Image (cartoon, rainbow, N blue to C red):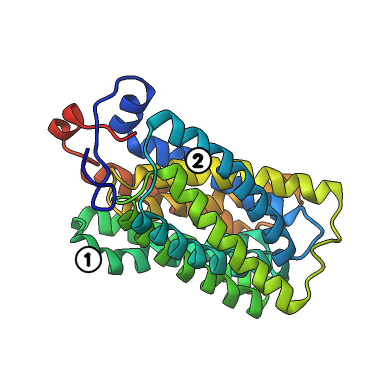
C-alpha cells in the first residue's frame, strides 16, 4: 500500500460501496436531503446560534470519535500527520461557517439564510479552475445560472419582506464564503485521508473554534434544556455526520462544481419544511423562484459530465 500522506490507495470491493460509487450523484442527493433538515431544527431551537453550534459540534465530535476508532480497526489504516493537518484546517473554516450560519438563522428566516447559499456554486466554480482544472460545459453553466437566478430571486424577496434582517443576511453571506472554501479544500484533503477520520478531525477543529468564540463572548452554553439538546443531537447525527459523510465521500468521484449546484435545492426543501413545521411565511414569488431553482438543478445534473470513467470504476473503489 502506498503512503497515505501521498494518496489513499483504492482497492476493489463489491457490495453497497461499489453500487454507491457507480451512482455518486445519488449519494450527494441523500446528503442534500439530510442537510435540508438542519436549518429547520435550528429554527425550532430556543438557544442562540453559537450555543446551538457549540453543543451540535461537540456531540458530533463524540459520535465521530467512536466511528473513527471503528473505521480504523476495520480497514487497519490510520491517517498520516498530513491528513490530520488538512482535516484540522478545514475544520477551522467549517467552525467559522457554523458560527455565521447559526447566528444568521436566529436573526432572519430559514428561507433567507439557506437561499444565500446560491453564491456557493459561483465561488466553487472560480476556485475549481486553478485547483482541479475543472471547466464545465456551456449547458451545465447555463442550467446552473438558471438555478442560481431562481434561488437569488427568492433570497431578495425574503430579505425585503417582514422577516428580513440586514445583519442576518450579511452573516449568511459569510457562511457561504466559509463553506465554499471548506468544500474545495475538503476535496483536496480526500487524497490524504479517509472520509470518517477527516470528518472527526474537522469536527474537533470546528468545535474548538466555536468554543473559543463562546468563551470570549460569554455565551451561556451551560443553560440549555433537554428539547434543545435533543435538537443539537439530531443535527449532529443527521445533517452533521450522515449528511457530511454522504457529500464528503462523494467528492472523490464527482466534479467539485456539481454538489454546490445540487445544494441549491436545500433552500426549497428547508423552506417547505419550515413553512409546514415552523409556520414561517413563504411568498408566491419564493414559490415560483423555488420551482425555477429546482428546474435549474435538474438540468445541471442531466448535463453534467460522467462522475468517473467506467473503466476506472471497474478497477477501483475507495474504502
Quarter of the picture containing the N terminus is top left
Q: Say which element carries label 2.
A: helix
In this rendering, the answer to whether 130 lies above or below 228 is below
> What residue is rendered at 74% in x and 63% in y?
51
First-in-chain label (2 vs 1): 2
Side of 118 where 36 appears, left or right = right
For disc 1, the marked residue is: 129
Label 2 or label 1, whichever lies nearer to me, is 2
Residue 317 place in picture, x, y as percent: 26, 32
> What residue is rendered at 38% in x and 54% in y?
261
> What residue is rendered at 25% in x and 42% in y?
307
Residue 103 place in picture, x, y as percent: 67, 69
Q: Nearer the viewer, residue 36 or 203?
A: 203
Q: Is residue 25 visible?
A: yes
Q: How many marks?
A: 2
Side of 119 where 188 appears, left or right = left
Residue 282 falls in which quadrant of the image?
bottom right
Q: Say which element carries label 1.
A: helix
For disc 2, the marked residue is: 68
Side of 135 where 193 appears, left or right = right
Q: Nearer the viewer, residue 177 or 314?
A: 314
Residue 319 falls in which quadrant of the image?
top left
Q: Nearer the viewer, residue 168 or 100?
A: 100
Residue 171 place in picture, x, y as percent: 59, 74
Structural distance between the alpha carbons of marks 2 and 1: 32 Å
Residue 132 place in picture, x, y as percent: 22, 60
In this rendering, the answer to whether 9 lies above or below 267 is above
Side of 270 where 225 appears, left or right = right
Q: Is residue 149 visible?
A: no
In this rendering, the answer to whether 199 lies above or below 130 is above
Amino acid at each position: 500500500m502506498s503512503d497515505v500522506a501521498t494518496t489513499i490507495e483504492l482497492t476493489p470491493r463489491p457490495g453497497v460501496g461499489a453500487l454507491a460509487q457507480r451512482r455518486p450523484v445519488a449519494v450527494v442527493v441523500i446528503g442534500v436531503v439530510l442537510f435540508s433538515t438542519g436549518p429547520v431544527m435550528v429554527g425550532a431551537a430556543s438557544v442562540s446560534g453559537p450555543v446551538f453550534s457549540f453543543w451540535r459540534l461537540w456531540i458530533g465530535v463524540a459520535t465521530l470519535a467512536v466511528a473513527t476508532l471503528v473505521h480504523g480497526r476495520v480497514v487497519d489504516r490510520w491517517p498520516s500527520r498530513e491528513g490530520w493537518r488538512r482535516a484540522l484546517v478545514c475544520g477551522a473554516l467549517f467552525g467559522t461557517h457554523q458560527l455565521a450560519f447559526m447566528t444568521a438563522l436566529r436573526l432572519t428566516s430559514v428561507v433567507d439564510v439557506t437561499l444565500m447559499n446560491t453564491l456557493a456554486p459561483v465561488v466553487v466554480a472560480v476556485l475549481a479552475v486553478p485547483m482541479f482544472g475543472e471547466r464545465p460545459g456551456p449547458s451545465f453553466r447555463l442550467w446552473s445560472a438558471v438555478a442560481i437566478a431562481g434561488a437569488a430571486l427568492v433570497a431578495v424577496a425574503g430579505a425585503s419582506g417582514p422577516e428580513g434582517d440586514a445583519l442576518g443576511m450579511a452573516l449568511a453571506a459569510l457562511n457561504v464564503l466559509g463553506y465554499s472554501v471548506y468544500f474545495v479544500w475538503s476535496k483536496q484533503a480526500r487524497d490524504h485521508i479517509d472520509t470518517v477520520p477527516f470528518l472527526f478531525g474537522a469536527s474537533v477543529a470546528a468545535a474548538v473554534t466555536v468554543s473559543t468564540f463562546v468563551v470570549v463572548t460569554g455565551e451561556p452554553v451551560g443553560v440549555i434544556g433537554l428539547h434543545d439538546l435533543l435538537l443539537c443531537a439530531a443535527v449532529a447525527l443527521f445533517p452533521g455526520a450522515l449528511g457530511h459523510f454522504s457529500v464528503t465521500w462523494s467528492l472523490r468521484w464527482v466534479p467539485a462544481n456539481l454538489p454546490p449546484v445540487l445544494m441549491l435545492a436545500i433552500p426549497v426543501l428547508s423552506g417547505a419544511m419550515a413553512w409546514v413545521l415552523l409556520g414561517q411565511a413563504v411568498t408566491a414569488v419564493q414559490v415560483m423562484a423555488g420551482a425555477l431553482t429546482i428546474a435549474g438543478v435538474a438540468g445541471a445534473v442531466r448535463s453534467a459530465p460522467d462522475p468517473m470513467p467506467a473503466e476506472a470504476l471497474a478497477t477501483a473503489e475507495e474504502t
